[in-house]
Image (spheres, rainbow, N blue to C red):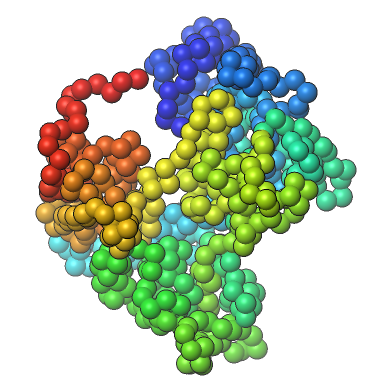
């Protein structure tokens, strides 16, 4: 689902194929690409002629850059795993005219749609509403009066499940509409450019592909000593079903997953205890943002925490006894105390799901379960050599375990196998934590930037702006928040941007796109932002930066070359 424009030939062929089947079809603007869902929404459902046109265009394109056509192979591209990464790669491949198949052993959508991003956002939408309604002071300041809010647990759970089902159906339909073959079963690489797939109890099928992408994703990581029963001790997979709302729940791990679930559970009435192995909460965040987040998201709520400790053993509740959590010092490994709680959520990260892929058949050895890849997502064998025509994207390679990173990697790979070299800048990929208020970030944290500056010999500057100075945030009575930019004052290069505040997850993209496109501070500060909007938080941030470099790279009114 890339936003880059297709080749003129491809665009013409697609438009011609679609128009020939429906004379009165809506025509998209020249050079504009749509993902499958967008096409269906506009009545632009791909016809067989359009699919054939795309494939013929790609065959000509690959022939032109020295690659052979699809003769001798069942598919131009086979993708193992139909999560967000595999789906993004498949749609982009079809738009490039590649005959594409995707193999899925579970359900389309992978972790994100079924057990991650999508259902969790449904629960967080509920927690956001509840939190607002429960804030009597906030309501009164807006002149509103509300009765005591309540919720129906099963209806909340159904909302999350129904959303996942809807998105899963949309993803499936979008691939089918574009001509992607969806093959059901467990995919295994049996040799060079060969994949076997099948379901238990049924005969296996073997297919060949010019190129193969591994996109098998990840599963929750559960440390040793923790016993999962799915009811009182569980992972995020179980928690998203919201089968209960415990009075007191321990959350092991205070990263994105743990923080978001603390937002959900406290809004629904639970007391939360964090168990964190490192010396501070939210260790992955910029330290300044982490401290502010603790003041806003942790301290005012029914949350306490233990840092610098491991949960060495967790025993589920049974026979009328509570969940028992044995804590040991992270450094000395000495026993510190035993917690007794109603439930425990294990949010200690995720592990790659790469077993059973048949990597031993092609001399590939995983590293802590991750498939080794180079900057182009090409799989590396045990001798450090590139395995031809084999790629790995998403959580399975461990470069950046985010759904949209997987999709971006998949699109990058498809660009490469279509004859256009593409290396994804992972520092330009944003991340977000959908708490209330939200946290978002892109690029380096301040300590990371200063470490890089010390090694490479350049200066670092930092500018900040508060949501309290933003008209739109004040109109919403949501002035708590901070935006922070780390940059090079000698060149204007943006090294990192971190935001905590209302709709931070939406605001970060202006910064991430600037990093991706190489836009300098001295250029972007001339961009115009609508008033009054939250985007002016970023506008003020860019304008506050002082760059020593003389002049501006180009006028903000200068058109960008195609």
As drawn, is 5 to the left or to the right of 547? Answer: right
Q: Residue at x 57, y 38 (%)?
A: 87
Q: Nearer the viewer, residue 366 or 136?
A: 366
Q: Nearer the viewer, residue 323 or 377?
A: 377
Query: Residue 241's spot in the image, x, y percent?
Result: 56, 62
Is residue 387 something that shows in the picture? yes
As drawn, is 15 to the left or to the right of 548? Answer: right
Q: Residue at x 74, y 50 (%)?
A: 363
Residue 97, above or below 482: above
Residue 214, above or below 252: above
Q: Residue at x 20, y 37 (%)?
A: 524
Residue 61 appears in which quarter of the rendering? top right
Q: Looking at the figure, which quarter contains the C terminus?
A: top left
Residue 150, above or below 419: below
Q: Nearer the viewer, residue 178 or 81?
A: 81
Query: Residue 534's spot in the image, x, y percent?
Result: 21, 47
Query: Residue 386's spot in the image, x, y percent?
Result: 63, 42
Is residue 162 something that shows in the picture? no
Q: Residue at x 50, y 81 (%)?
A: 310
Query: Residue 423's spot in the image, x, y percent?
Result: 47, 38
């Amino acid at each position: 689902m890339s936003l880059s424009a297709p080749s003129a030939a491809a665009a013409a062929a697609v438009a011609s194929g679609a128009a020939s089947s429906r004379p009165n079809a809506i025509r998209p603007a020249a050079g504009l690409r749509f993902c499958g869902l967008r096409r269906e929404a506009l009545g632009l459902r791909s016809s067989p002629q359009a699919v054939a046109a795309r494939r013929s265009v790609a065959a000509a394109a690959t022939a032109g850059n020295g690659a052979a056509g699809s003769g001798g192979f069942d598919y131009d591209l086979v993708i193992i795993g139909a999560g967000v990464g595999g789906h993004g790669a498949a749609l982009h491949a079809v738009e490039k005219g590649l005959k594409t198949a995707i193999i899925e052993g579970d359900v389309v959508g992978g972790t994100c749609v079924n057990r991650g991003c999508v259902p969790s956002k449904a629960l967080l939408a509920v927690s956001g509403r509840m939190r607002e309604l429960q804030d009597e002071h906030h309501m009164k300041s807006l002149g509103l009066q509300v009765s005591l809010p309540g919720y129906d647990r099963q209806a909340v759970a159904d909302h999350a499940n129904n959303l996942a089902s809807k998105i899963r159906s949309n993803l499936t339909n979008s691939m089918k509409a574009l001509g992607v073959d969806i093959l059901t079963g467990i995919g295994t690489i049996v040799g060079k450019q060969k994949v076997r797939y099948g379901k238990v109890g049924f005969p296996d099928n073997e297919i060949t592909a010019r190129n193969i992408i591994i996109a098998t994703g990840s599963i929750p990581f559960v440390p040793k000593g923790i016993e999962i029963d799915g009811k009182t001790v569980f992972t995020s997979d179980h928690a998203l079903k919201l089968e209960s709302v415990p009075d007191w729940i321990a959350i092991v791990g205070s990263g994105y997953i743990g923080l978001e679930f603390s937002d959900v559970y406290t809004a629904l009435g639970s007391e939360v205890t964090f168990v964190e192995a490192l010396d501070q909460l939210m260790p992955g965040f910029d330290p300044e943002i982490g401290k502010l987040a603790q003041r806003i998201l942790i301290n005012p709520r029914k949350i306490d925490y233990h840092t610098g400790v491991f949960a060495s053993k967790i025993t589920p509740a049974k026979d009328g006894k509570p969940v028992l959590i044995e804590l040991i010092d992270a450094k000395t490994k000495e026993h510190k105390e035993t917690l007794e709680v109603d439930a425990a959520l294990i949010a200690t990260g995720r592990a790659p799901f790469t077993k059973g892929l048949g990597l031993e058949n092609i001399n590939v050895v995983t590293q802590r379960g991750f498939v080794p890849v180079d900057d182009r997502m090409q799989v590396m064998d045990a001798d450090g050599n590139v395995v031809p025509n084999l790629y790995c994207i998403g959580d399975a390679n461990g470069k950046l375990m985010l759904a949209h990173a997987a999709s971006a990697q998949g699109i990058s790979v498809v660009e490469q196998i279509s004859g256009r070299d593409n290396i994804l800048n992972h520092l330009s990929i944003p991340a977000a934590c959908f708490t209330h208020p939200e946290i978002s970030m892109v690029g380096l944290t301040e300590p990371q930037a200063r470490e890089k500056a010390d090694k490479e010999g350049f200066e670092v500057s930092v500018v900040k702006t508060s949501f309290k100075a933003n008209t739109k945030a004040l109109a919403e009575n949501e002035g708590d928040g901070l935006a922070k930019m780390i940059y090079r004052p000698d060149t204007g290069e943006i090294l990192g941007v971190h935001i905590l505040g209302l709709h931070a997850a939406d605001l970060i993209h202006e910064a991430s796109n600037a990093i991706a496109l190489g836009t300098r501070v001295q250029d972007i500060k001339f961009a115009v932002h609508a008033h009054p909007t939250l985007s002016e938080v970023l506008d003020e941030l860019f304008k506050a930066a002082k760059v020593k470099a003389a002049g501006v790279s180009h006028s903000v009114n200068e058109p960008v070359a195609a």
